[in-house]
Image (cartoon, coloured by chain):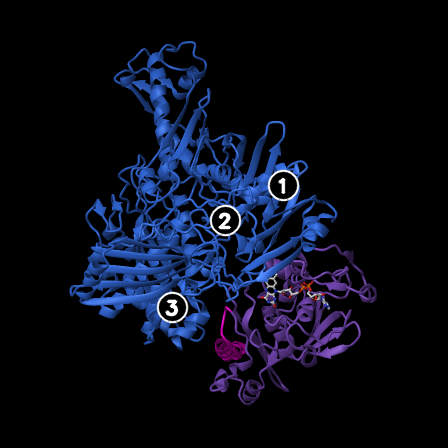
Chain colours: A purple, B blue
């Protein structure tokens, strides 16, 4: 690790001010950032911890919406959202291992937008709104490709508002080594329609599978996806699976998500 | 009533108390006053010429003590290879210099290019970034077949090619072997890969070198399975130091699995640098460094052919293997694909003709050496896979085909140089069929199918040669060391005992099991006995722990030394009781005179040995301490039969292991609980190899799975609860305990059972799949099903 300064502000405004310094970087749970620093792959001058900000962590709900503070840990979401949004809580409970879940935060996960991460699928699949220090961004606008988001320099995710669907499920097929998603599919049925978000598969990062959504709008049942297939062209190929395998798995996991959503 | 003390009892592992409560003393726990830290600048390309290294800016950085490059080690020896294999034409293996720091050429990603010693590790890392390297890229040699092709780039310019040796073993009459195949009723051929693995012990490697100007003595603390071997190799071949001036200590070591047998550059570096810098020098490997600097395992590509007659008797076996050596020859690298592999190709079967052909190849990859099983898993995998394939081709029952070809007469001389002293393969197979509930499989398959899953059953046998080894035999085969072991039994005046053993325990539980033996022999409580290991300053000598040799070889030395102790103690007892030595009996810690009611206790005798007031001083020295060296007469031959049951998800290709059963014959057993644990651990690693682990290189020589993000280690939920049975026991005929060794069996015997089971599952669904290369990842299984 290179040397850096450390600040732990207690308000969002102070955090934004602290992040105004050039080369300052926000620190959530550190589950992605700290390993990066240890490998000397990043050189921030200052880390601004977001975990001491009152109001940035916790799960609250009402009016068909679950709101999660940007610094809320995966473990807390798994526990506290279980009643209001079980599919989301289940997703959080399957991220990494207990140590990761007790440190890692939803804001950090979304800001990082790892193409194999789980939360992006939930946010996109739920049509969530990302609340930041300056604005609100819809999930459809937020994710912009591998490790790319709509966030500006120094912009902080303060909360994420999830509309609660009638039914939903996230089905994750584990990459055998990292146990991130080799492919993960989040399917959610709202009165306004079905949303299906896919993570782990595409070279462009998390995406919505529109054909599946249309088919499921007509009939929210696994069979509705029979015969649908994704073009393997844009899929990720690596040690753990070919493009074709990932394209195939999206179909399998989508059906399982619909079946599990009930 | 199970015993609660001595041989056959299962006391809990006493060392676990300190391991599990944070009281262990691992090398990284040790900090020496005034120590400096070294950071190794490692190559990030696989093959390049070092045009220049400029360390001037780095030397001026804060805290830097000294920076070393290849030039600083030009006068120092290279890392030696401990085994010289003679090729099929009688020529020695090609043996390149293996420098401590790359001297002019980089040959694998991870090779040390420079070493920065500084006050703190962060300062050393900062300075390493200021080193300017001018490299001339060369094409990377990665694929073995291509490496042997005409016109391939050479990994070592000074060698004639990338071939280390071309070796033949067993029946070397090609025409006779071919004739056996020509006259066969059936020939089964299989091409397969034994995947490259990274050992990944929980504790990464660590080394701390110290030098005392006052006494001109060096101390190296290191994570080693065999500190005496490290001292010998480092002193005699690398640094040219007198052995009596060097102490090597391997304190608590958190797993090795073979990867900590070898002498590594970092050990020699820290020892050398301690004197050069005038300070102790410490290095702790990061996990990332471990992936690219610990010796890797396996990495064979094989074509195996099995010939059978019309009655399904095996008539001949022929193999052609390419084995990867990596960029340099690690300590035991050349022995693994040759003598540790070829000698096992007969397996449990009476195949009369066996020919093993092996070409070992240099590539621009991390050196490859012994990993749990070392050669024997590679042999077992090929053989048990080809037998399974033959059974399927012939429509024979895989168990019956094996039984029909079992060796049943012992001793048995194989066509590949070994003499199996004892065994009972029928008994272990009988036991397996019972433990694995073979009869219930059909019902379990029906249940799986009802859930939409495919279920498969796979079986295999294994035999291994453990307890390495008779020194004269391995010497004839090219070993550059003897493979005996040693123990000193020191009895204190009050009767407690320290046994100084050459074996090293790094997870095996020796601190519990070794005392059980001594306690049993004397008839005292095992709490009165401790072992001391891992320190050349305390232990007289030892060849260390690998090849499941500890109890068979070092344990035998300990028995011999204890026998000497007992013989002397009996003389003292005879004197005390005014009887003849020959009439003294020792039982439950009491010496008695046969036919009388006279007795003296163990403690009276030990006290007398050290307070020899009433003592036959003219005939007997005072004191009670004995040493024995033991050189085994033969290898030991643990063997058994394993069965695996898998479920395959046809939608995703995911394999889950539903049952795994093991019936092992380890001969006599000291501590059944520890044996269970050893088998469990081995099975976990074998299943890891079969389903998960894969050290994959790209064409540029970059390791693709260089962290746990991509290198899949088996986790608890990847393995089932095992059914392990070791009640079949044919005691080893040539060592005093009748023991065979159990450390590697699980890793050797499990991969073929897993693959056989998956193939069975896929064929049950009508898929024309005869083989899938390990690891059987979901993607590979799915591709095979849909290929
Ligand atoms: C062993 C392991 C297993 C894992 N498994 C999974 C898995 O299965 N699925 C999965 O989805 N993830 C997994 N992760 C990733 C984990 O979920 C991380 O916690 C997450 O990706 C990053 O969150 P963090 O709070 O730790 O962020 P940090 O590491 O602190 O930060 C990550 C990035 O986000 C920025 N950032 C942090 N918080 C904010 C914020 N509120 N606003 C704006 N920017 C911010 C930081 O500046 C940094 O660039 C795993 C991680 C590990 C170490």
Distance Cα–Cα, label 1 vs label 3: 47 Å
Both labels 1 and 2 in a single chain: yes
Q: Nearer the viewer, residue A227 or A81?
A: A227
N-terminal label among 3 and 2: 2
Q: Nearer the viewer, residue B361 or A129?
A: B361
Q: Quadrant of ligand 1?
A: bottom right
| Residue denoted by label 2 | B98
Q: Is residue A249 inside the magenta stretch?
A: yes
The quarter of the rendered structure image containing the C terminus of chain B is: bottom left
Residue at position x 25%, y 43% in the image: B421
Distance Cα–Cα, label 1 vs label 2: 22 Å
Horizontal and vertical percent position of residue B112: 58, 52
Quadrant location of residue B617?
top left
The label nearer to you, 3 versus 2, is 2
N-terminal label among 1 and 2: 2
N-terminal label among 1 and 3: 1
| Residue denoted by label 1 | B281
Q: Is residue B765 left or right of residue B495?
A: left
| Residue denoted by label 3 | B772
Distance Cα–Cα, label 3 vs label 2: 36 Å
Which range is magenta? Answer: A239-262
> What is the chain letter for disc 2?
B
Residue at position x 63%, y 55% in the image: B52
Q: Is residue B318 left or right of residue B115?
A: left
Q: Is mark 3 within 8 Å of ligand 1?
A: no
Q: Nearer the viewer, residue A215 or B230?
A: B230
């Amino acid at each position: 690790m290179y040397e850096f300064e450390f600040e732990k502000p207690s308000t969002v405004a102070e955090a934004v001010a602290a992040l105004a310094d050039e080369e300052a970087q926000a620190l959530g749970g550190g589950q992605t950032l700290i390993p990066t620093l240890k490998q000397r792959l990043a050189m921030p001058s200052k880390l601004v911890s977001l975990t001491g900000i009152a109001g940035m962590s916790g799960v609250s709900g009402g009016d068909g919406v679950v709101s999660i503070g940007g610094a809320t840990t995966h473990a807390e979401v798994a526990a506290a959202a279980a009643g209001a949004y079980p599919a989301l809580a289940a997703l959080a409970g399957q991220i990494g291992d207990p140590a990761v879940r007790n440190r890692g935060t939803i804001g950090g996960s979304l800001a990082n937008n790892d193409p194999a991460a789980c939360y992006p699928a939930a946010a996109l699949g739920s049509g969530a709104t990302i609340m930041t220090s300056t604005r609100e961004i819809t999930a459809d606008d937020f994710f912009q490709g591998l490790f790319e988001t709509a966030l500006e320099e120094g912009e902080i995710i303060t909360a994420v508002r999830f509309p609660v669907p009638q039914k939903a499920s996230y089905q994750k097929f584990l990459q055998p080594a990292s146990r991130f998603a080799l492919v993960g599919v989040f399917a959610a049925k709202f009165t306004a329609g079905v949303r299906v978000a896919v993570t782990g598969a595409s070279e462009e990062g998390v995406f919505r599978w529109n054909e599946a959504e249309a088919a499921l709008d007509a009939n929210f049942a696994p069979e509705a996806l029979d015969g649908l297939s994704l073009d393997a062209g844009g899929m990720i190929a690596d040690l753990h699976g070919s493009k074709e395998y990932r394209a195939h798995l999206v179909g399998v996991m989508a059906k399982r998500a619909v079946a599990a959503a009930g | 009533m199970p015993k609660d003390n001595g041989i056959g009892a299962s006391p809990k592992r006493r060392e676990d108390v300190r391991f599990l409560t944070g009281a262990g003393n691992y090398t990284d726990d040790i900090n020496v006053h005034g120590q400096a830290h070294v950071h190794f600048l490692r190559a990030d390309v696989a093959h390049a010429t070092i045009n220049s290294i400029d360390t001037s800016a780095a030397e001026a950085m804060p805290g830097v003590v000294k920076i070393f490059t290849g030039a600083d080690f030009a006068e120092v020896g290279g890392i030696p290879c401990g085994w010289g294999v003679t090729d099929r034409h009688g020529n020695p293996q090609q043996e390149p210099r293996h420098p401590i720091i790359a001297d002019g050429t980089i040959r694998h990603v991870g090779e040390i290019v420079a070493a920065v010693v500084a006050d703190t590790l962060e300062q050393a890392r900062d300075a390493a970034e200021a080193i300017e390297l001018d490299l001339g890229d060369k094409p990377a040699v990665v694929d073995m077949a291509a490496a042997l092709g005409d016109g391939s780039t050479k990994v070592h310019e000074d060698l004639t090619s990338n071939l280390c040796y071309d070796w033949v073993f067993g029946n070397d009459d090609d025409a006779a072997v071919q004739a056996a195949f020509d006259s066969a009723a059936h020939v089964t051929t299989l091409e397969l890969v034994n995947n490259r693995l990274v050992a990944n012990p929980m504790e990464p490697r660590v080394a701390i070198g110290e030098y005392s100007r006052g006494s001109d003595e060096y101390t190296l603390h290191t994570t080693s399975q065999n500190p005496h071997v490290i001292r010998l190799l480092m002193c005699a071949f690398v640094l040219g130091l007198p052995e009596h001036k060097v102490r090597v200590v391997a304190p608590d070591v958190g797993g090795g699995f073979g990867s900590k047998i070898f002498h590594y550059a970092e050990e020699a570096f820290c020892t050398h640098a301690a004197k050069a810098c005038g300070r102790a020098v410490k290095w702790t490997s990061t996990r990332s460094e471990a992936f690219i600097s610990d010796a890797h395992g396996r990495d064979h590509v094989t074509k195996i052919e099995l010939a059978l007659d019309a009655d399904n008797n095996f008539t001949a076996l022929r193999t052609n293997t390419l084995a990867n050596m990596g960029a340099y020859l690690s300590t035991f690298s050349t022995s693994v694909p040759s003598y540790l592999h070829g000698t096992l190709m007969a397996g449990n079967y009476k195949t009369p003709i066996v020919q093993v052909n092996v070409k070992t190849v240099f590539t621009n990859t991390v050196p490859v050496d012994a990993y749990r099983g070392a050669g024997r898993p590679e042999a077992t995998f090929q053989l048990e896979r080809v037998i399974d394939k033959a059974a399927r081709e012939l429509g024979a029952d895989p168990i019956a085909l094996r039984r029909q070809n079992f060796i049943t007469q012992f001793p048995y001389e194989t066509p590949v140089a070994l003499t199996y002293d004892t065994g009972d393969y029928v008994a272990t197979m009988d036991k397996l069929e019972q433990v694995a509930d073979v009869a219930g499989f059909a019902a379990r398959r029906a249940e799986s199918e009802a859930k939409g899953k495919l279920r498969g059953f796979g079986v295999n046998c294994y035999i291994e040669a453990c307890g390495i080894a008779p020194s004269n035999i391995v010497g004839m085969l090219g070993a550059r060391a003897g493979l005996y072991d040693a123990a000193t039994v020191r009895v204190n005046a009050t009767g407690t005992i320290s046994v100084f053993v050459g074996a090293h325990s790094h997870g095996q539980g020796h601190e519990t099991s070794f005392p059980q033996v001594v306690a049993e022999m004397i008839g005292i409580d095992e709490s009165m006995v401790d072992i001391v290991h891992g320190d050349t300053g305390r232990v007289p000598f030892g060849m260390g722990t690998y090849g499941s040799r500890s109890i068979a070889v070092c344990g035998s030395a300990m028995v011999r030394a204890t026998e000497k102790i007992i013989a002397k103690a009996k003389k003292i007892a005879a004197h005390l009781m005014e009887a003849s030595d020959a009439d003294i009996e020792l039982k439950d810690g009491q010496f008695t005179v046969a036919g009388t009611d006279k007795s003296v206790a163990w403690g009276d005798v030990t006290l007398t040995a050290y307070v020899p007031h009433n003592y036959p001083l003219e005939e007997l020295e005072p004191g009670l301490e004995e040493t024995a060296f033991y050189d085994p007469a033969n290898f030991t031959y643990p063997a058994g039969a394993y069965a695996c049951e898998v479920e395959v998800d046809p939608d995703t290709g995911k394999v889950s292991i539903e049952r795994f059963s093991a019936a092992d014959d380890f001969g006599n057993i000291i501590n059944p609980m520890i044996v269970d644990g050893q088998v469990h651990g081995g099975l976990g690693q074998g299943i890891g190899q079969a389903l998960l682990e894969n050290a994959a290189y790209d064409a540029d020589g970059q390791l693709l799975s260089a962290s746990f993000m991509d290198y899949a280690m088996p986790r608890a939920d990847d393995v089932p609860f095992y059914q392990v049975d070791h009640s079949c026991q044919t005691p080893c005929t040539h060592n005093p305990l009748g023991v065979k060794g159990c450390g590697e069996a699980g890793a050797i015997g499990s991969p073929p059972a897993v693959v056989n089971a998956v193939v069975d599952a896929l064929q049950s669904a009508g898929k024309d799949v005869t083989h899938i290369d390990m690891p059987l990842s979901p993607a590979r299984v799915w591709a095979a099903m849909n290929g």
